[in-house]
Image (spheres, helix red, strand yellow):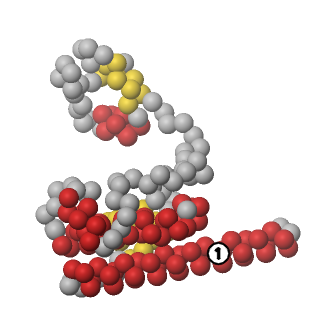
Amino acid sequence: ICELTILFLFFILGYMKELICRAENEIVECYLKAQSIFNTTFQLPTIEFKNMGRTAGKAFYSKNHICFSPVLLQENVETFLKRTVWHECCHLFTHVLYPNAKQHHGPEWRGVMKKLGVQDIGRCHSYDTSSVARKYKLQKFTYKCNCQIHICGPKIHGKISRGLTYTCKSCKSILSLA
């Protein structure tokens, strides 16, 4: 590896470290604002940065944990910090404030987002995910029922292979491998 490559890698690592620090600071800002508005103490979550395909962030209620995509953070810094970080934190706040809430993006979560002043209350991000999209084509499996052909991905195929039964919504018959 040449010297220039090593310098470039150190630059990238330093930049990512800075972005992660900015994300952590944004989480602290979000938590301080939520504690002030809701007059409740929220425990700071554990945070992890890992590649999750096209998913920008994901909150895990039972673990008080949030995962973020480092690639999507790097490619969408300002929007990611102001939208995705707050979006995931609001999931954890909603879980504490409304433990019986039924929907992940339901009225309770939307209310928390509004009270915290988050502008974009949409369920999904609109980031360009071409850099993190699957590099391979998913295998498809063909199933049939009494009225049509069904195309299933590997996840459903695996469940059927392990004995789970799926029925057609139209004719109510059990799917079988074509």
Quick check: 80 left or right of 148?
A: right
Residue nearest the observer in this picture, 124 or 145:
124
- Percent coordinates x, y for residue 92 in the rendering: 28, 70
Residue 41, located in which quarter of the rendered image? bottom left
Local crowd size for mark 1, using a 10 Å CA cut-off: few (<14), some (14–19), many (≥20): few
Q: Residue at x 29, y 22 (%)?
A: 176
**Figure quadrant of residue 153:** top left
Task: Identify the residue position indicated by label 1 in the image.
Answer: 15
Image position of 119 with respect to 176: above or below = below
Amino acid at dot 1 = Tyr
Q: Residue furthest left?
A: 100
Q: Residue 135: horizontal and vertical position, in percent?
A: 59, 44
Does 104 sit left or right of 44 as displayed?
left
Q: Is residue 34 left or right of residue 100?
A: right
Relative to 49, does residue 177 appear above or below in the rendering? above
Q: Residue at x 21, y 26 (%)?
A: 169
From this viewpoint, which residue is outermost toward the top? Answer: 147
Residue 85 placement (x, y as % from top left): 42, 69
Of residues 106 and 100, the one drawn nearer to the viewer in this rendering = 106
Residue drawn at the location 40% of the way across and 82% of the way down: 29
Q: Is residue 29 above or below residue 94?
A: below
For numbered disc 1, what is the local secondary structure? helix
Which picture quadrant has residue 75?
bottom right
Q: Is residue 63 visible?
A: no
